């Protein structure tokens, strides 16, 4: 097995019979080959982006979310436990509701408290406030458009907040769903 050597600062450093490579701890492995300690940067602190602003924007725009699977699964489980049947997930109608009851024409949306600006739990992030204000306002406007359009097409719309899925509020939520189905 070969020997490893590396430099620390301006000195020659150490070289010896230690077969393990140097451990950098908080330091990024990309910067580990730097010959000057001052060039080593802790991960995530004051490091310049390797992409231009335009390229970073392009890269980030290609990242797609995976939906609100955790909250959807929680609601599906709740409906199964309470023997509420007749629902379909991601039914192909305007707005792609999380759950739809086609025979009753009921669309159910599970809204995350942050992404849909819940009046009880939403708070605007401190960093980049203008961006987040615009983004969350656009989400709320889209929610209104989807609800209005579905109602014009004869559907009932039920919006469920993420915080309504907690155990102590589940009974009330089940009553709301059943009430919508009995209309």
Image (cartoon, rainbow, N blue to C red):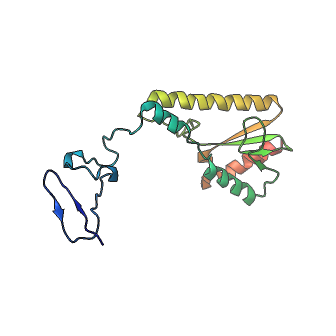
Determine whether, in the image, residue 30 is placed left or right of residue 143.
Answer: left
Q: Of 33 and 131, which appears nearest the observer?
A: 33
Q: Position of residue 105 (x, y in %)?
A: 83, 40
Determine whether, in the image, residue 18 is placed left or right of residue 121.
Answer: left
Quarter where residue 80 is shown: bottom right
Residue at 19%, 56% (x, y): give it: 7
Residue 49 visible in the snapshot: yes
Quadrant holding the N terminus: bottom left
Residue at 46%, 36% (x, y): give it: 56
Residue at 66%, 32% (x, y): give it: 143
Quadrant holding the C terminus: top right
Q: Does residue 109 lie above or below 136 as drawn?
A: below
Q: Position of residue 72 (x, y in %)?
A: 66, 50
Determine whether, in the image, residue 94 is placed left or right of residue 47.
Answer: right
Q: Residue furthest toward the left?
A: 11
Residue 124 visible in the snapshot: no
Q: Position of residue 58 (x, y in %)?
A: 51, 34
Q: Of 103 and 28, which appears nearest the observer?
A: 28
Q: Position of residue 30 (x, y in %)?
A: 34, 50
Q: Of 93 and 112, which appears nearest the observer?
A: 93
Q: Residue furthest toward the front?
A: 2
Residue at 63%, 28% (x, y): give it: 141
Q: Of 160 and 141, which appears nearest the observer?
A: 141
Determine whether, in the image, residue 144 is placed left or right of residue 28.
Answer: right
């Amino acid at each position: 097995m070969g020997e490893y050597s590396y430099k620390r600062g301006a000195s020659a450093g150490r070289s010896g019979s230690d077969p393990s490579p140097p451990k950098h701890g908080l330091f990024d492995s990309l910067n580990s080959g730097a010959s000057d300690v001052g060039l080593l940067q802790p991960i995530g602190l004051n490091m310049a982006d390797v992409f231009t602003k335009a390229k970073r924007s392009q890269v980030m725009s290609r990242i797609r979310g995976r939906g609100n699977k955790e909250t959807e699964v929680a609601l599906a489980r709740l409906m199964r436990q309470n023997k509420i049947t007749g629902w379909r997930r991601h039914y192909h109608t305007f707005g792609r509701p999380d759950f739809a009851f086609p025979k009753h024409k009921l669309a159910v949306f599970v809204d995350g408290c942050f992404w849909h600006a819940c009046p009880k739990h939403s708070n605007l992030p401190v960093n980049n406030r203008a961006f987040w204000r615009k983004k969350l306002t656009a989400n709320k406007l889209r929610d209104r458009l989807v609800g209005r359009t579905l109602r014009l097409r004869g559907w009932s719309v039920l919006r469920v907040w993420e915080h309504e899925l907690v155990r102590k509020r589940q009974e009330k939520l089940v009553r709301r769903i059943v009430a919508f189905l009995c209309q």
